[in-house]
Image (cartoon, rainbow, N blue to C red):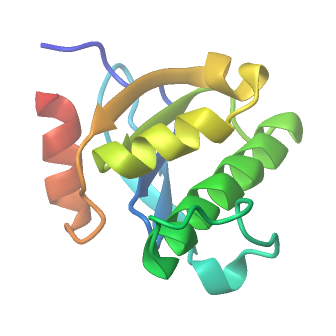
Amino acid sequence: MTESIPQNALVVVADGGKAILFRNEGQGGELSLREEQRLEPATMTQGPSGSRPEEQSPKQTGEATFAKNLAHVLETMHNDGKFKQLVLVADPQTLGQIRAAMHKSLAAAVVRSISKDLTNNPVKEIERSLRAA
């Protein structure tokens, strides 16, 4: 069995086009996720992630931009004291892009990361996957 997710930790389940933010309300090592917020590119205010390499498609640029903006939102939330511990769950590419955009203080808050796309799964399936990972 893997280490439990701390109570009140922020659990972010993301892919290249959306993120769902959950709070773990479970006590005593239990996992009970409550959805707090959904983020999509339209709700993000920052611009592109930088210049687009020629070999990168506009879709890939959009996904990289979303990952950068998500990291910025999480950094702001962390700085504002909205969470102390963070669990990241994302497909491998998005997870790498988020990590690359993180400030050291936010990276230090990550207690667990899982390379898996769970954004289209129901909450119970996300909880089951987190327990198994």
How far from the left and from the top, in percent, is residue 9?
54, 34
Residue 99 appears left or right of 126: right
Residue located farthest toward the right when viewing the structure as drawn: 80
Q: Quadrant of the C terminus?
A: top left
In depth, the one of 52 and 125 nearer the eye is 52
In depth, the one of 22 and 107 nearer the eye is 107
Residue located farthest toward the bottom when viewing the structure as drawn: 42
How many numbered circles does the render carry? 0
Residue 116 appears left or right of 96: left
What residue is rendered at 29% in x and 13% in y? Answer: 3
How far from the left and from the top, in percent, is residue 10?
55, 41
What residue is rendered at 74% in x and 55% in y? Answer: 73
In depth, the one of 51 and 88 nearer the eye is 51
Residue located farthest toward the front when viewing the structure as drawn: 54
What residue is rendered at 11% in x and 30% in y? Answer: 132
Residue 70 appears left or right of 132: right
How far from the left and from the top, in percent, is residue 93?
36, 48
What residue is rendered at 55% in x and 60% in y? Answer: 64
How far from the left and from the top, in percent, is residue 14?
42, 58
Relative to 15, is 94 above or below? above
Residue 25, visible in the rendered structure: no
Residue 109, visible in the rendered structure: yes
Q: Quadrant of the N terminus?
A: top left
